[in-house]
Amino acid sequence: MTEQADAATQVERTARHSTVLDWSVRAGLVAYGALHLLLAWVALRLVTGHGSGSGSATGQGALAQLADDSLGRLLLSAMALMFGGLAVWQLIVAFVGYRRDVGLKRHLMRIGAASRVVVYGYLAFASARLATQGGSGSGQSPDSTTHRVMAAPAGTFILVAVGVAAAAIGIGLAVFGLTKSFLDQLDSQARNADRRVPIVVLGQVGYVVKGVAFVLIGVLVVLAAVTRTPGKVGGLDQSFYELLGHTAGSVAVVVAGLGIGCFGLYLFARSRHLAEHSLTS
């Protein structure tokens, strides 16, 4: 056990000081930030009434905006590599990261890293497929996927679990933003220099709004499972359409879109001011 711990410590130390990993993560964060800006753009188009046929506010739907020409497909190819780099990063973190934490907290943080491996891996796959197949590679809608899950044994319970998990993640993101815990991801220059204020604002607004969006999606998934109406399930666009049907819904969608855009800009700042220790935590 001691030899395994020593080996894990060595791998963690090597990863934390790796120039290749450092630049890979920085590039990946830029790609992830660009994705959030695309999501914000799609959301704002929904409000102006130009959303029809222009993509959906899901990760794959937003990326599909780039699949219509050769330059866009080239960007998608680059983004596929960048998302792949993020997946590898989180895979390393899932195995040897968070060594400053102990006990249950370390295990929970590593589970979170493992879940991000899935997210980044999916985005890498979606980007690569869109780059090679164009718009035809946008895949099936969340609605059709939900139909299949709902028809499976215990499908309703699975959807409820997914919805509750999404809502829990959203609450965690909002708390993470409100408590400014994200500052630990940044180097000392970003945490102490004059640029701290705009970065903190971007981070707080971005994390809170993204958290609220996750909660909203989670609620819609649970409602779809309980009422057996899979048409209620979708990405952010489905959530936004639900909001647009209520008073002040357009204002809420605009705020949500701007908040998601803030998160994208925060990711750009994080890429610029990435703290060395955050490579493995």
Image (cartoon, rainbow, N blue to C red):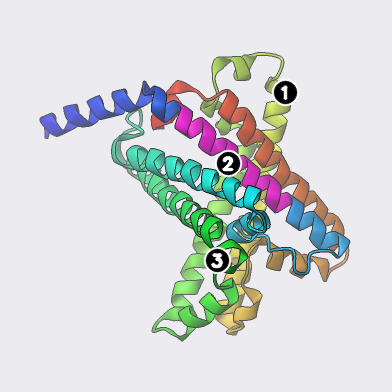
Using residue 246 as the reference point, say whether residue 219 is left or right of it.
Answer: left
Q: Earlier in the sequence, mark 2 or mark 3?
A: 2
Question: Three-letter amino acid code at disc 2?
Answer: Ala
User: Residue 236's image quarter?
Assistant: bottom right
Q: Earlier in the sequence, mark 1 or mark 3?
A: 3
At horizontal 66% and vertical 40% (from top left) the residue drawn is 264
Using residue 30 as the reference point, say whether residue 48 is left or right of it.
Answer: right
User: How packed is label 1: few (under 14 Cα within 10 Å), some, or many (20 or more)?
Assistant: few
Question: Three-letter amino acid code at disc 3?
Answer: Gly
Q: Work out whether residue 108 or residue 260 is closer to the camera in this orientation and state it.
A: 260
Q: Earlier in the sequence, mark 2 or mark 1?
A: 2
Viewer-nearest of labels 2 and 3? 3
Residue 115 percent coordinates (x, y): 42, 51
Viewer-nearest of labels 1 and 3? 3
Give, as a single range, the part of the protein colored magenta. Answer: 23-40
- The answer to whether the residues at label 2 and label 1 have Cβ atoms under 8 Å apart is no
Any mark on residue 31, and which? 2
On the image, numbered disc 1 is attached to which residue?
Answer: 197
For the question of whether residue 209 can be seen, the reply is yes
At horizontal 76% and vertical 57% (from top left) the residue drawn is 43
- The answer to whether the residues at label 1 and label 3 have Cβ atoms under 8 Å apart is no
User: How packed is label 2: few (under 14 Cα within 10 Å), some, or many (20 or more)?
Assistant: many
On the image, numbered disc 3 is attached to which residue?
Answer: 137
Magenta stretch, main secondary structure, is helix
Residue 126 percent coordinates (x, y): 51, 58
Q: Is residue 228 magenta?
A: no
Q: Is residue 39 magenta?
A: yes
In which quadrant is the N terminus drawn? top left
Secondary structure beneath label 3: helix
Secondary structure beneath label 1: helix
